[in-house]
């Protein structure tokens, strides 16, 4: 690097300062402002994402058949919503049906749990004689507390369901409003996709719109690839767990498999977190065959996932496993589970933006500052 003049050096450090301030402001906005805005405008954000997906199909249908764009958008939005509504309706019906069955049979579940505790207590009686009196008293208190918890569990479970009725009704009403807003917004954005894009470009200006377009494309690509990878892994968990539980004859197999798929969708957490403790409890309760089945199922799926995961995640996200692990860990420390979910997405967005060379000037300035400081230290 050539020697910097006083004026060039002042401009260089001013640019670095401004970029640092902008970086800090962006981080603060992402942490404190963006989540709040997302909760306020969620129906419109999802409508925009749906419009992004439907727009190519709408354009092709218009070119091929010459239909009105508004009519095509209306038909497609109605078809997509009807299909989703049918799937979600079937999904909710199955869950409610199994939950009602579980609630009706809760007494038998409680009896099974109490029997398992009795079995554990019998097996531990010989062990208690070797413990000091203080430890024996402590262990006896723990067992008594478990019995008391089980005795009140049935009533607490039913009371919980009844107490949540009002909350569920309110949530359902809000969800209906959100769905209606989402459908209307999806139609308008899809029908007026190019017109709205032109208006945004006109009001933002060509230079700012370029950055907006870069951010939009990077976010769409990162979010789509990451969610596609995680959904494929969760689907794999459901496809493996549901037939296995069904073949074994496990009650509520669909509900349990669905829960395990959801657990597998969460970062860091896996199905083994549920299956292995469940197997240990069955082993302690004397059901050795079921315990072995659950533990073998957990280990087999863990191995299968570790074989398949790099191929799915790598092919979908192009993210190195170490970078993905770091982003999950940092996100988990900052914002819990949601941070762990959004961490890899944020890293992928940043990588996609960097690939557009939008930060080349900033990188050059940082190198110039480093070289200038090195020259000053040598002098």
Image (spheres, rainbow, N blue to C red):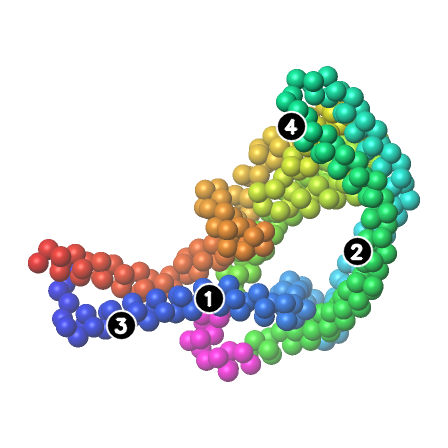
Q: CA distance from mark 3 to mark 2?
A: 55 Å
Residue of label 3: 14
In the rendered view of the protein, which quadrant contains the C terminus? Answer: bottom left
Mark 3 crowdedness (10 Å alpha carbons): few <14, some 14-19, many ≥20 = few
Q: CA distance from mark 3 to mark 1?
A: 21 Å
Camera-nearest residue between 38 and 180:
38
Locate residue 343, reporting x and y percent: 51, 53
Question: Magenta span has 168?
Answer: no
**Would you say residue 51 is visible in this rendering?**
no
Q: CA distance from mark 4 to mark 1?
A: 53 Å
Mark 1 crowdedness (10 Å alpha carbons): few <14, some 14-19, many ≥20 = few
Q: Residue at x 62, y 47 (%)?
A: 266
Q: Which mark is residue 88?
A: 2
**Helix, strand or loop status at disc 3:** helix
Corner quadrant of residue 8: bottom left
Above or below 258: residue 368: below
Question: Magenta span has 214?
Answer: yes
Corner quadrant of residue 357: bottom left
Mark 4 crowdedness (10 Å alpha carbons): few <14, some 14-19, many ≥20 = few
Residue lying at the far left in this picture: please name it.
379
Q: Residue at x 57, y 39 (%)?
A: 309
Q: CA distance from mark 3 to mark 4?
A: 69 Å
Number of labels in the image equals: 4
Q: Earlier in the sequence, mark 3 or mark 4?
A: 3
Mark 2 crowdedness (10 Å alpha carbons): few <14, some 14-19, many ≥20 = few
Residue of label 4: 134
Residue of label 1: 28
The residue segment tinted magenta is 199-215
Closest to the camera, between mark 2 and mark 1, is 1
């Amino acid at each position: 690097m050539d020697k910097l003049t006083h004026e060039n050096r002042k401009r260089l450090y001013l640019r670095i300062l401004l970029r640092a301030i902008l970086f800090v402001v962006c981080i603060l906005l992402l942490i404190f402002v963006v989540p709040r805005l997302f909760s306020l405008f969620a129906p419109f954000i999802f409508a925009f994402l749906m419009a992004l997906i439907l727009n190519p199909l709408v354009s092709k249908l218009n070119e091929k058949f010459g239909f009105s764009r508004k009519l095509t958008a209306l038909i497609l939005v109605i078809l997509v919503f009807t299909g989703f509504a049918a799937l979600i309706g079937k999904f909710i019906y199955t869950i409610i049906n199994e939950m009602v069955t579980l609630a009706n049979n809760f007494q038998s579940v409680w009896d099974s749990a109490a029997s398992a505790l009795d079995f554990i207590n019998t097996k531990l009686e010989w062990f208690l004689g070797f413990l000091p009196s203080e430890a024996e008293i402590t262990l006896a208190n723990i067992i008594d507390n478990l019995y008391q918890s089980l005795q009140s569990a049935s009533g607490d479970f039913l009371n919980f369901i009844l107490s949540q009725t009002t909350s569920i009704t309110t949530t359902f009403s809000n969800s209906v409003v959100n769905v209606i807003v989402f459908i209307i917004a999806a139609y308008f954005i899809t029908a007026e996709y190019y017109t709205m894009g032109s208006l945004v470009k006109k009001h933002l200006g060509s230079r700012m719109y370029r950055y907006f377009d870069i951010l939009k494309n990077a976010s769409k690509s990162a979010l789509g690839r990451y969610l596609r990878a995680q959904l494929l892994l969760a689907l794999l968990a459901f496809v493996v767990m549901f037939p296995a539980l069904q073949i074994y004859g496990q009650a509520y197999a669909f509900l349990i498999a669905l829960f395990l798929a959801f657990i597998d969708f969460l970062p860091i957490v896996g199905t083994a977190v549920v299956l292995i403790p469940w197997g240990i409890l069955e082993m302690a309760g004397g059901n050795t065959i079921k315990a072995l089945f659950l533990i073998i199922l957990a280990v087999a799926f863990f191995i299968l996932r570790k074989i398949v995961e790099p191929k799915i995640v790598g092919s979908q996200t192009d993210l190195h496993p170490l970078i993905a692990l770091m982003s999950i860990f940092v996100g988990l420390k900052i914002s819990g589970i949601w941070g762990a979910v959004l961490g890899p997405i944020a890293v992928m967005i940043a990588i996609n933006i960097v690939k557009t060379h939008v930060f080349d000037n900033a990188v050059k300035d940082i190198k110039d500052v480093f070289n200038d400081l090195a020259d000053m230290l040598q002098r």
